[in-house]
Structures are given as structure tokens and as C-alpha cells.
Amino acid sequence: MNIIQNFPLFNIVMCLMGGVICSVLKAKPAKCLSMGLIALAGVMNGCVLWYAAKYGQYTYMMGHFPAPWGNEIRVGVLEAVLALFFCIIMFLSVLGGEHYITIDIEESKTNLYFTMVNLMLTSLLALIYTNDLFTAYVFVEINTIAAGALIMIRSNGHTLVAATKYMIMSLVGSGLLLIGITMLYDVSGHLLMVNIHEQISVYARTGEYAFPLTVTIGLMSVGLAIKSALFPFHSWLPDAYGYSTPSSAAILSSLVSKGYIFLLFKIFYRVFGFDFVLDHKVTNILFVFGVVGMIAGSVMAIYQHDVRRLIAFSSVAQIGYIYMGIGLAVPMGTVAAVFHIMSHAASKSMLFIAAKGLSDVSGDSKDFSDLKGAGFRNKLAGIAFSVGAFSMVGIPLLAGFTSKVYFAEAALLASNRKMAVAMVALAISTILNAVYFIRAVITIYTPNPKRELAAKDYRLPRTMAVALVLFIILNVFLGTWSNLIEDAIEMGLKTFS
């Protein structure tokens, strides 16, 4: 076996052990270890992507125990692309907010923050690579605990309330997912995804267990929709993103919900089979909720006066885009949804980091009335915020524009009713995106002489500057070299089921 084939498992174990080690280190060594592990995981996943693209998909049996006793990792181009991308976003998110981690968090808890960052990356990589449903559930719970800790570690009233809301909603979703997994195991006798799919294929032909399987796919879909904040299950999201530290907000908005959505992809394609999902009309339901979320999230964002809550409500709309892509029930819709996972992550994490830079030169206020002229006072943060905002609106050459082109292309390939609804929803949502994001950009570039004098001695943290520049480059890369990403996604989807 080639050593690169071991890298996915090495990544998961390495980051898990890194979290344990960080818990007993002091703040600075914990930060260095954590950043080093994220970077190393990114390099290793890059090697895995090269290997999968050259030699194709492979399955890694841990301990070489076959089904039904063994546990498996399944690696293909799609998994490797997302694993590499998640590592890049995680690294830039932590780097961009690194200066504020020591300010917002007590020194005695800083090492625990990096423990949770490592556990978060561990869970995301495991959700991407695992071929075992119960293993996926275990890491869903690790992800939930790590996300809750990243929210509440700032230790003020707002974050404690936000973390409580998050945990209540998230545990409801986890409970539904676990019930679904239990029913699937009871019906199929397997936990490995491929083995479950083989058994479900038999039942689909014979008609056995039709009702339990319908209930199961419903429970699992709703559970993961709740955890990924699909409208109307989004109530925890604005506070969780709005009051946590900049790095936490960037990680939560760009990665956490995306891990759950990718698990839903695996359940649809690898566990039930997409034909089975289509027969049960699940995609139609997700399509409706996705379209409503696109519009509702944007409308709620328009009424926000706090820049971070505006960005948070925008995420509700963007999650709707992803579910709409799934609901279109055509291969191009899935390609568009996966690409939007990446474009949204690159843009939204940059927006949260840039928003903190704008707030710093506005008396630490997040209110738009105080942010006037912030783009002049912190030029790089202003440029980064504008790039992220224009990407979300869909300005050409940026990642968000390419996402919307792919969604439009997928809509044209869907059924007539869905095509019409999707195209209208894309147009309305884009207009609403422009209303609140362009308003925000105009605000930060509206001169405010009083604030300019007060912020004249401000110095942008070096780590934030580096992260924002790299975020801008990444966003432009996704917008201009999207054909490479699209080809990789399509290649991965061909062998994904």
C-alpha cells in the first residue's frame, strides 16, 4: 500500500491527538502546534488529491477487518478537494483572528480554544472521509461539542445564550439523525454505507420495509437540515456568529454547516442511492425550503443594523442556495451546490475577519452608523469586505458569480416547474443581496472625519493582513479558475455513489 493512502487516517488521528496535547500546553505552544497541524493536514490532503486524481478512488480498511465488523475510509477526488479546501479555510480563519484570540479569551483558556479548533478539524475530516454511518455520527457529536465551545469560550452573556441556543437546536438534529441511523441498522444489519446501499437496493426491488425506509430518510434529512441551519431552523445562527470571536465566527460560518451538508450528500448518494431519494420526493421538499431560505435570509439581512448579524443572516440565504441545488435533482445541481460550499466558505470567512478590522477603527462598534468611513480608516479590511460582499452579490471574476452561473445552468437542466422557480428565486435573491451588501459597502466608504481622527494611530495586525490578502486571492482564484474546480467535482461525483 502506498503511504499516501494512509494520509486521510493520519490526518484524523494527528489532529485528534493534537487537540489532546494542546489541552496541556500553554497558550503560545498550543497556537503554534495547532497552526502547524492544520498546515500539515493541508499538505497531506493535497497529496491525497494528487493520488486520487491519478489512480482513482480507493477504500482503506482500518485493521483490515472486513464488513460487517470493520470500519472504512473511502477516498476519492471529491473528498480530497473538500478536505484540502477545509484545511485552507481553517488555517486562514485562525490566522486572521489570531490577534483577537488572546484579547477575547482568558489566557488560561487559550490552549483550550486551540484544542477545540483541532477537534473541529478532526471531525470535519472524518465526516468527509468516513464510510461508516455510526463513525459519522460520533464525529457529528464531536463537531457539535467543539462548535459550542468555540462560541461560548469568550465567556460573556451573549455567547452563553448563543451557545445554549446552538446546543438545543443541534442536539435535536443529532437525535433525529441517530434515530435514523438506528432504524437503518435495524433494517439492513450494516453500518458501512456501501453495504447499507446494497441491502436497500434489494428492498427497493422487493418493496420490503418501504414505510420504515421512508421515515428513516425523512428523519436523517431533517436532522442534518436542522444542524446546517436550513431555514426555518436557523434561529441559533445569528447569535452564534454575531457574538463569538472573529476566528470562531469565520470557522462556524464557513465550515461547520458544510460538514453536515456533505454528510447529507453521502447519505443520499452512497447510502440510499439518488434514485431512491428521487422516488421519495425528498429533493422536492429540500428545493422548496432552499428557495424560501434564499429569499427569507436575504430579507432578514436587509433589516440588520449590525454588520456581523447582517453577514450571519446572509448565511441563511446561502445555505438555501445549496439546498436548492440539491433539490434541482440534476447532476449539475450537485456540482453547483458543492462549488457553492467552497465559494461561500471563502467569502463568508473573509467577511467576518474584515468586519472585525472595520469595527476596530470604529470604536469597536459593529453598528453601521459608526462604520461610516471605516473603509478609509482600514483600507485592507475595506477592500476585503468589498470583495466578499461583491462575491456574495455575484459580481463577475469572483467566486459567488461562478456559483450563480452554475445554479442557473443546473436550473435550465431541471424540470420546467423547478427551472422557472429557481431562475426567479436566483434573480430575486441576487437583487436582495445587492440591496444589503452594496448598502454596507457604500456605508464603509462614506466619509466620517471624526472617526478618521480617532483612528489615525490604528495598526492592522500583521496576521490579519496576511489572511485577508490570501482570502482575496482565493476568492479571485475560485472565480477565474473555476473550471479546474468544476472538473474535479465532476470527476469526484462520477465515483461518489
Image (tube, grey):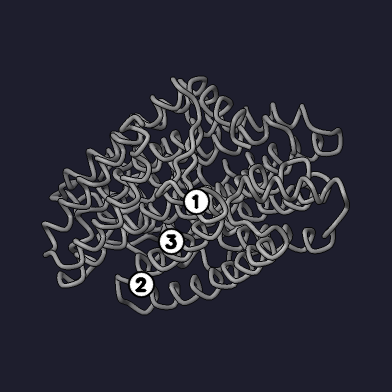
Kindly identify which residue carries mark 2: 152
Q: Position of residue 142 (x, y in %)?
A: 42, 64
Q: Name the amino acid type tagged 3.
A: Asn
Task: From the viewer's perspective, tell me whether residue 187 is left or right of residue 417.
Answer: left
Q: Are marks 1 and 3 in contact (CB under 8 Å)?
A: yes
Q: Are marks 3 and 2 in contact (CB under 8 Å)?
A: no
| Along the line of sight, the residue nearer the viewer: 286 or 360 | 286
Q: Residue at x 64, y 67 (%)?
A: 182
| Along the line of sight, the residue nearer the viewer: 462 or 72 | 72
> Going from the N terminus, do you reach mark 3 or mark 2 first?
3
Q: Is residue 352 above or below residue 150?
A: above
Q: Which image quadrant is residue 497 in? A: top right
Q: Name the amino acid type tagged 2.
A: Met
Kindly identify which residue carries mark 1: 259
Measured Cα–Cα span from mark 2 to mark 1: 21 Å
Mark 2 or 1, which is nearer the eye? 1
Q: Secondary structure at mark 2?
A: helix
| Along the line of sight, the residue nearer the viewer: 185 or 356 | 185
Q: Name the amino acid type tagged 1.
A: Gly
Measured Cα–Cα span from mark 1 to mark 3: 9 Å
Circle 2 crowding by C-alpha within 10 Å: few under 14, some 14–19, many from 20: many
Circle 3 crowding by C-alpha within 10 Å: few under 14, some 14–19, many from 20: many
Kindly identify which residue carries mark 3: 143
| Along the line of sight, the residue nearer the viewer: 438 or 200 | 200
Q: Residue at x 19, y 61 (%)?
A: 21
Measured Cα–Cα span from mark 3 to mark 2: 14 Å
